[in-house]
Amino acid sequence: MVEANVELLEDEPQYKEFAIEEFLVRSEPYYRPVSDELELFQAAYEQHIPVLLKGPTGCGKTRFVEYMACEVRVPLVTIACHEDLTASDLVGRYLLDAQGTRWIDGPMTRAVKAGAILYLDEVVEARKDTTVLIHPLTDHRRILPVENTGNIIEADDRFLLCISYNPHYQSALKDLKHSTRQRFISIEFDYPPIDVETEIVAKESGCNEEQAYALARLGDKIRNLREHGLAEGASTRLLIYAGRLMTHGIAPRRACQVAIVWTLSDEPELQRSIEEVVHSIFE
């Protein structure tokens, strides 16, 4: 037993590391189109039109961007936006080291220079004084002014800005300015129809078609509970998680409980309502 542990410790770590602007989606991710979103994005990319993706949690927005980055064969730089995100976090800052003061480009600057797709996920979470940084990149100028260095960077011809947010989480305090919104085309996403979601769940989780269909029906029924106080319906992502647990031998009801019921709500009454839906499908 001791020898086995030593052998494991001697194994080299299995990971890959890339510069952020060099990360290419090398193997094509699975993405099932629902409408004409592929054609719309391709046209926007070729015409240098920024893209806004709107849709609920776990409906496939991020996977879609990964798929399109692979299709057009450019790096993908993803930034998860949050309320503490500053302009320096995006553009860059001066750092002091043993050699003195030097400038370090931020991920936005590196994406602009490298000709990547820059994906700002949940952009409404960022501060408004930060989001205005993207304005010069989203019109005919396609430039990034860097105030701290006094430079202006022209975007590489392959560069595209793509942002996303969940409209269900919008509020007066967390919304895009109209001056920002009207710089993008908007592609709306939603959870797919049951037959399409069945196909997606089966492909992504490895469960059989009968189980995938049951999970897709479950997702559809739970989403109707939003009218009864549920903040967000079951995402396709959660259905896939449940399917993966089932594929690994976890009983369907238990898999749904830990992947869906307990994840969606902490309210005992809502949990019981979701459990009833689960039991009605997985008898």
Image (cartoon, rainbow, N blue to C red):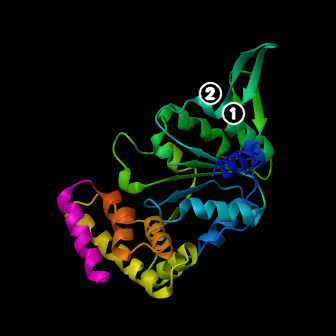
Please give left or right for residue 159 compared with residue 186 in the image: right
For residue 106, the mark is 1
Q: Position of residue 118 (x, y in %)?
A: 66, 48
Q: Which one is earlier in the sequence, the residue at label 2 or at label 1?
A: 2
Amino acid type indicated by mark 2? Ser
Residue contact at pointers 2 and 1, CB within 8 angstroms: yes
Looking at the image, which is closer to me, 206 or 53? Answer: 206
| Quadrant in the picture for residue 135 | top right
Label 1: state its secondary structure: loop
- Residue with the most extreme right position: 99
Most foreground residue, 211 or 107: 211
Q: Which residue is mark 2?
A: 88
Please name whichever residue, 69 or 187, is drawn nearer the observer in this view of the structure: 69
Q: Residue at x 74, y 66 (%)?
A: 27
- Magenta stretch: give its range: 266-283
Tell me: residue 164, above or below residue 90.
Answer: below
Query: Is residue 239 a member of the stretch shown in magenta?
Result: no
Q: Is residue 280 magenta?
A: yes
58 or 154: nearer the viewer: 58
Kindly identify the residue that appears in the image at 64 percent across and 46 percent down. 138
Q: Position of residue 242 (x, y in %)?
A: 43, 69
Q: How many marks?
A: 2
